[in-house]
Amino acid sequence: MQLDEFFVTGEPLIYAGMVSIVLVSATVIFLLTYFKRWKWLWQEWLTTVDHKKIGIMYILSALAMLFRGGVDALMMRTQLAFPDMNFLNSQHYNEVFTTHGTIMIIFMAMPFLIGLMNIIVPLQIGARDFAFPFLNAVSFWSFFFGAMLFNLSFVIGGAPDAGWTNYAPLAGSELSPGPGINFYLLGLQLSGIGTLATGINLMVTILRMRAPGMTLMKMPIFTWSTLITTFIIIFAFPILTVALALMTIDRIFGSHFFTLTGEGLPMMWANLFWMWGHPEVYIVILPAFGIFSEVIASFAQKQIFGYKAMVGAIVIIAGLSFVVWVHHFFTMGAGAFVNSVFSITTMMIAIPTGVKIFNWLATLYKSKIVFSAPMLWSLAFIPSFTIGGVTGVMLGMAAADYQYHNTYFLVSHFHYVLIPGTVFACFAGLIFWYPKMFGHKLNERIGKWAFWLFLIGFHLCFFPQYFLGLDGMARRIFTVGPEWFTLNFISTMGAFLMGLGFIVFVHCVIYSFRFSPRNIEGDSWGYGRTLEWATPTPIPKYNFATLPEIESHDALIDMKEKGQTTFDRDKLEPIHMPSYTGQPFIMAAIMFFASFALVFEWITLAVIGLVGIIVMMIIRSFDYDEGYHIEVDEIIETEKKARGMTDE
Amino acid sequence: MKGKKVSLQKKWFTLLPVLLAILMTGCDKMAVLDPVGPAGESQKNLILYAVIFMLGIIVVVFTIFAIVVFKYRANNPNRKPEDYRPDHHGNVKLEVVWFVIPVLIVTALSIPTVTTLYDLEKPPESSQEKEPLVVYATAADWKWIFTYPEQDIETVNYLHIPTDRAIEFRLSSADSMASFWVPQLGGQKYNMAGMENTLYLQADEEGVFKGRNANFTGEGFTGQTFNVTAQSEDEFDDWAASVSEEAPELTQDKYDEILAPGLLDETMSFSSTHLEWVDHGSNEGRDYSVERHGDKYDEGLHLENKPGWAPDEIQQ
Amino acid sequence: MSEQKTDDVALEYSTHQGQMNIVGFWIFLAAEISLFSTLFATYAVLFGRTAGAPEPAELFEAGTVLIMTFILLTSSFTCGLAIHNMREGSLKGLMVWLGITLLLGLGFLGFEIYEFVHYAHEGATIGSSAFWSGFFTLTGTHGVHVTLGIGWMIAILIQLKQRGLTAVTTRKVFIVGLYWHFLDVIWIFIFTSVYMIGMVV
């Protein structure tokens, strides 16, 4: 293979990408060397099994991916801003919308939420860590290397260009030769393994590690939504694993699952993809609902309204999410009966979702609303998401969907649910729990600026797209004429406003890192209701020295009434901790190596990588490291310091 | 300071339905809401029926939202002590109400959806006395091939249909999955290799309408468009006769050339059809194109934008 | 937490960590069920799409498949005996029966490899047609699982030799046992819905 086939050449934007990758890497290496931080990086981060640190790494990676996906979005909007633009050519535009969709769903939304779950769920249920801390580290690193593999395609080999849905036969080896689609298949496979492992891990954690007295119906709503999400992950992700594997075998080993030759069935890809893909949508929306419930109850200073109905609604949505996948291709010609059935199941999702919306509104009734930045994100979610929701019902009406399908009406709809749903929740959750992660709050004034810019930009960007869709503008076209100029131009302006909002948010993070006051309360906002706020800030390694008996889903409110804390000297015992280890990082790095080889169909190298993975598994099997204990004296010392207590 | 932000927020959200109303006044011009045939008409009616319910929901949610956010803000100077009930946690009656209302709405939306779905599977009732005209619409990367078996003619990248008569489109694809869509005639359906979908459409008005592939098929997708000319039955017959007499015969070599991936500069007409040697909608025809052109996707088209080429402009 | 011991339960359940590992593995098996269901569904959808390659009824041999089924079912039984010996506290019995299970597993794999090679000679490979892609992927995935199970058992046998019966080693044996029984169940579905139906239709 020639070097110019290996690297993507001939595009100024890609050269810019290469230069920026080299520059960023060089800067990182320089800074680490200059400040002598290599050892710190390895000992504190790359080898960590602490759920809080892994969560932070998830969120940082997700923010980086949000930036990459956002740049993709702005490039697309620039191309569509004016008639007859030549900013991107067709091929490049196709690559950009493919990576935008894939990155935002797989490498941004999910890891962001999984990051928040990582940090918060063990804290909400009073656990010391995950059930399997080692596996948690494996999950993170396989996600991370999967994301790296996918992003590498931009400069090496060529990016995937068949859309994030990667439909066969277009994505098959006949119509899309070359490594592009392989990057998609293996990048997703690698990170998908991590997601499945996290799903199992979190489920066991929630089922078996809750604080004494915390029955299922006394769990905070976010933990509930996480538990249901793990159910969806466990049953949906294996379908993706199989679908990706089958297409990989098709492309690399010449089988005929989705091919036009050999009597393969391209339609089957669409079915398998959406049998995973629709539950996937709820994997990124249910935890978001959980976050909003927590934030709204906290800053409304009021119990969540209809706790049982909220939990029930999540369960019903999760169940329905598995029986609606056909609505992604009503136009495939399955016939009136099949379309009717899936139309009705789809619209039925609106019922539990509507119940949730009204319960949130009822929570605000007779409350005391404090307009903090996380609350603003959560409040903005309600009306914005309602627009996305009702247009979703419209799309669910199959006969009308024939007119909306594959248009900007659809594009607008799913951005209207995924941005106010997932992205607003990510911001709300990040700002809300930020003090628990970093020991200081984010600046409220700058944070609110970021919110307003992003919110206005969002509506400006996507609201006009409904009308473009109704006027027949198909999605994924790379150029438009003067007829649709006005609405497209408004949309692009909105997109740039959202970009500005993101920059202001990054500024807010940097500003707060430098100037925000430290030494804050465990209950950093003063409105906390659940157990995570009972820990001191910053949180000790072991999370909880002791735990009181839990009596309701607002554990902290009860504890405050009774004057309990998570530091009861009479109950102290040594705490068992898992040891840090470099194995997960090394194992995932080898998986990356094997997948990269497979992308270019270098079978020998891939087999060597596979052997490496097996060797790592054997090493793990023979590893009897029992971890260590934190002694009572050390706990007392830590807690006293964290709680600012003096010897009495 | 904070109070100002609240009212700003409220104004912004109440602005949305207003904006919606303003934009809806432009409805008549939007292709989907300006149908010229019975299929599109029934879909338009279904859409507008749904919009009424949806606007109702939006108004209710936005109003309640605006009121509670405004009234129960912590810094409201007019707060009374009874305005804060921190332990208020449920009300079965209310919860039943907002469970039942969505159920009723979903029911009200399901019934017309299902009846329309069944209606769209049949030729429209308004032209029942005539047999539908059969047209094979075959997608190939990145063009449209229309075959009229009755007339024994074939066109590429343009379509003529008679008005007031149902057209039975038999949809298939030579390679990647496409979607046949003429927004003003009615909703789309997929074209897939190795199988055949049927789509009934009809034009009640004469005119030229935009048609396109709506499903992403790769590099030339944006340019995979065609114009539909709807004309009276007599004019259509004249046109078909002239194509039959004047256009060249379609040879298999010429047809294979057309199938090769790429965009065509011009429309084409032929006085015979490709159905003589291949039907892409049958199991035997599924790999016809891939067998011949599978090796041509290695090199990209390096397709650049050209002024006046954008798909929303009708080229006559 | 992991060192809290509970009395009156089997050794593998005696620590909190051990219990969680076992629960976690049950959940993993649920994911495996989802994975194999997808493969079965794929196979069913592609059934009959042979595109000119040999038909399954021409190639499937009742004898070989019956022997494979018998071997795997027996191995499940011997695996059960191994767990029984473990519960009785007999390290030797455990290791012997686990060793026999392992040998039976190897026998099964041998027959499967023979079968695949034989089909390939007759002109049915993963690239022959959609049906054969589905067949080889479904049975191959099961075969890869069996292979991994064998490697896993070898690793556990070595650990048993090194460490004897502890809370950790017994937990590992118990989990590999669950895995082995699961593969047996999957094979029964393969036997009925792939081979029996394939030979009849």
Image (cartoon, helix red, strand yellow):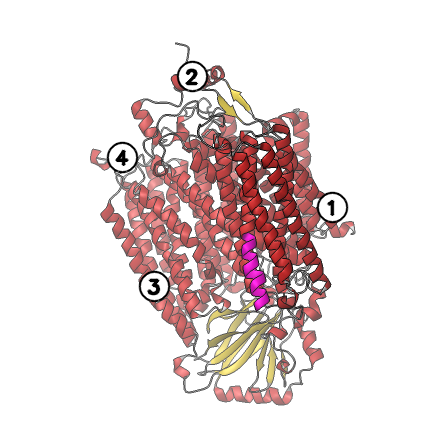
Protein chain holding label 2: A
Protein chain holding label 1: A
Quarter of the figure with the N terminus of chain B: top left
Q: Are marks 3 and 4 on the same chain?
A: yes
The answer to whether residue B230 is left or right of residue A2 is left
Question: Secondary structure of the magenta portion, mostly?
Answer: helix
A611 to C109, vertically: above or below: above
In the foreground, B268 or A216: A216
B15 to B151, vertically: above or below: above
Q: Residue type at mark 1: give it.
A: Leu
Total numbered labels: 4
**Residue range (magenta):** C186-201
Q: Residue type at mark 3: give it.
A: Leu
In the foreground, A612 or A279: A612
Please state the horizontal and vertical placement of residue A313, each as a whole percent of the image.
Answer: 35, 48
Q: Does label 3 or label 4 sit earlier along the sequence?
A: 4
Quarter of the figure with the C terminus of chain B: bottom right
The residue beneath circle 1 is A605
The residue beneath circle 2 is A644
Q: Are marks 1 and 3 on the same chain?
A: no
The answer to whether residue A37 is left or right of residue B121 is right
Q: Are marks 1 and 4 on the same chain?
A: no
Question: Helix, strand or loop at disc 2?
Answer: loop
CA–CA distance in space, label 1 to label 3: 57 Å
Q: Residue at x 69, y 66 (%)?
A: B294
The answer to whether residue A9 is left or right of residue A474 is right
Mark number displayed over residue B86: 4
